[in-house]
Image (tube, grey):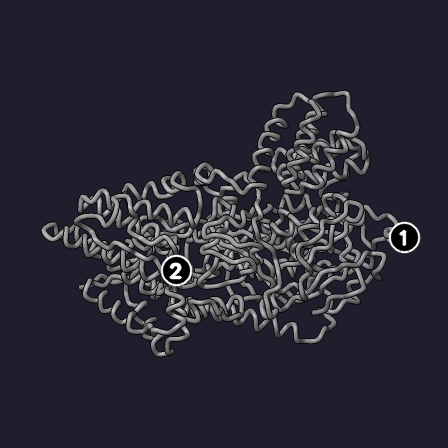
Amino acid sequence: MAASLPDVTDLARLVGAMGFGPEQLQQAMTDPSFRRLVSQIPAFSDLSSSTYEDILDDAFDQEFSQTLRMIEQAKAAHLREQSLPPVKSPQVPRSALLAGFTRSSGPASATKDTVVTMQWRQTYIGVVPGYSTKTLDELERIDINNMLVRKRHEGAYIMCRIISQTRHIVSVEMIVEDPLGATCLLSIYRYPTALDCTVEQADMMFPIGTILAVREPYYKFPSNGEVPLIRVDAPSDLVFLDRHPVLLNGVTWPTPGPLRSIGPADNAVTWKDRGNRYFKRKEWICAASAFSEGLLQDPTDHRLLLNRAAVYIELGWLRSAAHDAERVIAMDLEDAQLLRKAVYRAAKAYYLSGRYDDVRRLSSLGLQCPEVQQLCRNADRRLRERNSGQYDWATIYGATRAAASRPDVAAYRGPVAVQIPKGGVRPRGLFVTRAVKAGELLIVSKPIASYFPEDTPSKQDELFRSINLLNDTMNNRSHYVLIDLVVQRMWDDPDLASVIQAMYAGESFPAANGYPIAPAAPSFVGPLSHSRTPCIDIDVGRVEGVCSINAFGVGDIDFTDAASEQQEYPNLDKPTGLYELPSFCNHACLPSADRTFFGDVMAIRATRDLKAGEEVTMTYCDSAQTYQKRTEFVQKKWRFACDCLLCKADLSDSPAARSRRAEAVDMPSSLGISAIKQRIAQIKSTYTDSPERRRCGIKPELFHAYHRLGFVYSKESHVTHRLARAKVELCIIAFMDALEAVGLVITDRSVSGPVKGPSSALPVDMIRVPSLSHLCTPTVIQIASALSGALDQDVRARNWIKVAIWIENTSTGGGEALFEQKYRSFLNT
């Protein structure tokens, strides 16, 4: 009798809470982190891998449809709320609001009816109503009692005083009062470093007694309650009024208010000591604020300037860090040690921002500072990389095998330019400015911002779900954090703000600015005057749109099915990044360029010869999937239809043929040889010998079917020793068929006997690089391994390895040295 399975209700609830889609669920069942969570549910603590797979469908059936409904319901509720008119809402008495304000030290900690202990946070992307670009002098003051719910109060600002400690799940919330004594909740999103701060750190950022102004405040009902609040999505809308004494003249408060949670410091030295304590605890934003407060009392305190430069570097505010350090250098201090410290911090800020000539300038001051001289030597290497496009890819690859790798390399811009495509139907695209060869390096791009789950190890077991109303998706933590990181970068970088304005953010946002952008003049946008005040007004809605459309998953592309079976799946929350030039590349399922990641650095190379003026395209989806899946994915997220050569070839087949092909592809992968051959025959029968198909020459579905056949032959050769050699030969032939299905022209398909032509002649025609090179290289290695290990065909094996090196070098560069590093474990199997 078959063993009875445990009730899947608890697992289904957990799956639904995490917001998994089908592909994520398939990965989840083999992910150690997910199993660790599931193992805390008593009913599932002893389940085997096979049992996990048995209950997967039940869990999915119960909860995935609910997840889809949740997205639809969330969007419908948002649209309904947006359609309703503004209303006057009764004010909650001060005492009742304070009594009901439950302080939380973190997210909720348990799923219902289980003993699973985990953090759980949920939020939304795409609800931002706008941001203010007006100064307080241009706005009229409004009081809480005069505000309407469901309204952004354009032309007005509200003055308020914090009267409670904070609470924090996603936003930082507190109770505020206006000068008339009316109270309400204030909810602040996207404030730098606040997403993962503790409530104690939030109290330091927003201490009791702080007087704020909110420019053009948005008053709304929360998604899960009836007590209205002021929601601040653009943190640049916040103004700390302690630096605006004129506005406070004549302002009185009806109540004395609670005692300040963090008292003011008496002098600059006290602020410096407080900032140093924050710095040692790595509470960067608090340290920056303390040093800034000290500088308000003594603007020439060189130690405060140096300390603030150090914390600005940690926050990524490199422009202002360099400015603070340069101010100290200009003081011509007699203390040589302090001068060296100032030069080093300025040089480090310039180096990290790619201003390598400024690093060299500072190194020429003649100071005996080994750290600055090392930065100068590194800057010389970066300049050579940036100017020549020559990189030591093998060394870079070796240095990026660690988690959360951000390699120290220079960005490179090859013969490409951003232009409007002919006809103007699509957004701006990237085009080559001269003829290029297949494999030529076009771009090396460092991210505007990147996030790895390893950046916040304490959040590895957190359930973070963001419902994106811009593209109707449910995302994990990384997508939300990336937006926060971009906002934090923009805090100090007006040029980045201009780049974000130039990037496509979807139909909901106005037309983008021109590109390339002109750098902001220093006289127009100066450095940060205080860490709490950004240098520009931040359009958070546009940042959300840009990141929703243009973010890239960071990491190596998987190998073949067989190879990936030997690797553990990565964490469910995957690394992500936003890149400048790559974001201007339009999509093609059969692209003209391909990307490779070295840590969070993206290198883009041409996949075929391109004429001057041809467009550089990259694929946004898995090109090896069926036309139906590719189209559904692209249209759902980006809302356009691809018209690349592969899609045109697929469209030349009848809808019935495409459906039969999809049915064959969706057949179980655990089929025997006879069934796989039937699948291959069915897939072949669906291709029409059309002009579009002949021009394309790519049949990715056939690649996977043939590769699966070769893999099964390979497995059987290890079981049926008597027929091992014959099985191996059939395995090799199947792999060759797979390679031909994606465009590799094989000139010698023999597996034994004399080698055609010279012994060193390659068995392929190198006039055309095959598509899906990330799949082809491991397949070629499998052919070489079978030839050498089972058939003793060492000469043929070496020639096929040369083919693999050629394909890989065209795709990723680095030559034989990088090839050996990247495929070392694969070559040894």
User: Relative to residue 372, is residue 721 drawn left or right?
Assistant: left
Chain-order first, disc 1 or disc 2: 2
One can see residue 67 in this view: no
Q: Position of residue 79 (x, y in %)?
A: 61, 73
Quarter of the picture containing the N terminus is bottom left
Is 645 rendered above or below residue 812? Answer: below
Picture quadrant of residue 357: top right
Q: Position of residue 731 (x, y in %)?
A: 22, 55
Indicate which disc residue 250 carries. Answer: 1
Q: Residue at x 30, y 43 (%)?
A: 827
User: Relative to residue 493, is residue 793 drawn left or right?
Assistant: left
Q: Secondary structure at mark 2?
A: helix
Name the amino acid, label 2. Answer: Leu
One can see residue 296 in this view: yes
Crowding at mark 1 (Cα within 10 Å: few <14, some 14-19, many 20+): few
Name the amino acid, label 1. Answer: Gly
Q: Which residue is mark 2?
A: 25
